[in-house]
Image (spheres, rainbow, N blue to C red):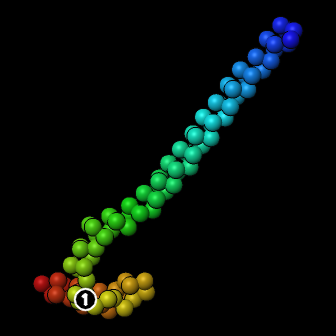
Amino acid sequence: MDPEIKRQLEEIHALAKDNHQMLRAIRRHQWYGVISTVIFWAVLLVAPLYLYQQYLQPIVDKFSVSAGVPATGPFGLPTFAELQKLLNPFQSK
């Protein structure tokens, strides 16, 4: 085999190996990006629900109109009449 052709063939082989390694690295970093994005959005969507259950729900339950009875307003919020009943003892003082 001609030495010039052999050198070119070895150079092409080295370039192909280097290209393969770069493509594998790109794919690996792409997967890391997808996984980190999924984890980020999962935390972003789940954290408020968890924090509400841990910290705000006990406070909301403490100030609810009657314990154990859900509010009858839209979206589970108390109606105006229920709020008036709650505020009446404080207004008379």
13, 31: nearer the viewer: 13
Whole-percent x and y of residue 40? Answer: 47, 52
* Image-based side of 77 in relation to 13, left or right: left
Q: Residue at x 38, y 67 (%)?
A: 49
Q: Residue at x 19, y 84 (%)?
A: 91
5, 75: nearer the viewer: 5
Residue at the far left: name it: 93
Q: In the rendered view, would you say 65 is above or below 49?
A: below
Does residue 81 appear anywhere in the picture? Answer: yes
Q: Quadrant of residue 63?
A: bottom left
Q: Quadrant of residue 92?
A: bottom left
Whole-percent x and y of residue 51? Answer: 32, 64
Would you name the residue on which mark 1 appears? Answer: 68
Does residue 80 appear anywhere in the picture? Answer: no
Whole-percent x and y of residue 25? Answer: 60, 34
Image quarter hosting the C terminus? bottom left
60, 92: nearer the viewer: 60
Image quarter hosting the N terminus? top right
23, 88: nearer the viewer: 23
Q: How crowded is mark 1: few (under 14 residues within 10 Å), some or many (20 or more)?
A: few
Q: Residue at x 41, y 63 (%)?
A: 46
Mark 1: secondary structure: loop
* Image-based side of 28 in relation to 3, left or right: left
Residue at the far top: name it: 3
Q: In the rendered view, would you say 36 is above or below 50?
A: above
Q: Quadrant of residue 10?
A: top right
Q: Which amino acid does label 1 sit on?
A: Gly
